[in-house]
Image (cartoon, grey):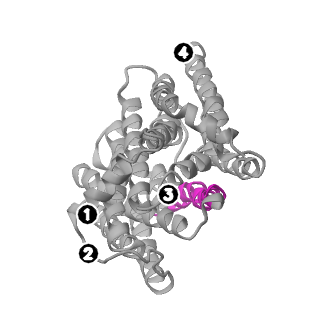
Amino acid sequence: MSPLGMDSYLPAVGQFAESLNVSPEAASWTLSNFLLGLGVGQLAGGALCDQKGRRYAALYGLLVFALSCFAIVAYQTLTSALAFRFLQGVGSGLMIVSGLAMIRDTTAADRLAGRLALAVFIVMIMPIVAPIIGAIILLFAPWPAVFVMSGSVAVAMFFFFFIKVPETHSDADGKLSVADAVKKYNYVLFHKTCGRHIALWQALNNAFGSAALLIFVTTAPTIIMGEFGLSSQQFPAAFGAVIVSVLIGNRLARYLLNHFAVEYLFIKGILVYFLVAIIFFIASIFIEFNLVFYLLFIMLCSGTYAAVNPAAQAIYLNLLDKNYGSATAIEQMLRFSLGGILGGVALVLPFTPVVSVASALMMGVLISTLFLSRTYSYWCNKAATP
């Protein structure tokens, strides 16, 4: 549901801007607002998951998502679109947290990275399909029809989930308590491993490290259709190429997890990702990019981190022994909020669009590497332990 809501709208951004007589840059903030809403929804979803249950959070997420879609269609102003895209992201955030927490509830620690890789592979099929769906809808109807479609799918999924999906969190007490939510978040934020805040540092490393794909998604309509001149019907092919690189990286992760320790894979992978990002940044300054060259570097960055991501998520969650909903919420909230902010930064930097994207990505990678330096010795020791 989350990539459907995010990516089916991408081909419609230009039509949305033209219809409401706003700039493409202003319309692109509806993408950043969705990501910011994802962060807030995941933060709220962590408490709901641990207190009321995973199923409860997912159902409310679907309801908020559907109502927000129909509200965008009803009001059709930039202000309302910004507000309701934020709420749409909130609903998506509730769903993401509940889904990941369910996976952790039902998976042994030594199998978690592989299960997360499989889940991400399934989810990442939608960013390939969703822009195509959006582009097809635009052939026959204006941009509001895209949100009608997303809202309708959410309604159908609500009833499917209500009937078919059981609760996996047996310790949920069913009571909402702000104090208890704060206590659970404090446990995650201030949890110490070997006397250090490894979990928090790892969550921040994951958040800034995953910026490549989120920056690309946020800026894709402005750069691919604006800078490079592709039509809304051509857009899905360019966008899908990047998602295919993520799927390839994800399959590579599944292979590598069968041959290397998860900590070793994380350390080596994040260093390779750092080198790829540096090359992209330097090349963007000295070379005039065409669309193919730009997509190639985005694919290398996104695909490389996709190979690292399952290991990064697994070692984070395995640091803790409870409150997985809250733990997932904090990490995912940081990922999507910081990714949305960096995407917004790329839109306002006073450089060419390609250099702006490369600069925002480099910011994320540098900050990620700083947090890696705080945990590097710990993961090296873990990787060396049979």
Looking at the rendered structure, the kind of residue marked 1 is Asp
Q: Position of residue 183 (x, y in %)?
A: 28, 57
Looking at the rendered structure, the kind of residue marked 2 is Lys
Camera-side residue of 224 and 212: 212
- Residue 285 is tagged as 4
- Residue 138 is tagged as none
Q: Which residue bears the numbered disc 2? A: 175
How busy is the neighbourhood of tag 1: few (under 14 within 10 Å), some, or many (20 plus)? Answer: some
Magenta residue check for 129: yes
In the drawing, does residue 181 fall left or right of residue 295?
Answer: left
Q: Which residue bears the numbered disc 3? A: 3
Looking at the rendered structure, the kind of residue marked 4 is Ile
Most common SS among magenta residues: helix
Looking at the rendered structure, the kind of residue marked 3 is Pro
Q: Which residue bears the numbered disc 1? A: 180
> Are circles 4 and 3 on residues that touch, CB within 8 Å?
no
Report the Cα–Cα distance between label 3 and label 2. 31 Å
> Are circles 3 and 2 on residues that touch, CB within 8 Å?
no
Nearer-N-terminus badge (3/2): 3
| Mark 1 secondary-structure assignment | helix
Q: Position of residue 283 (x, y in %)?
A: 60, 18
| Mark 4 secondary-structure assignment | helix
Report the Cα–Cα distance between label 4 and label 3. 31 Å
Report the Cα–Cα distance between label 1 and label 4. 50 Å
How busy is the neighbourhood of tag 2: few (under 14 within 10 Å), some, or many (20 plus)? Answer: few
Residue 303 appears in the rendering: no
> Are circles 1 and 4 on residues that touch, CB within 8 Å?
no
Nearer-N-terminus badge (2/1): 2
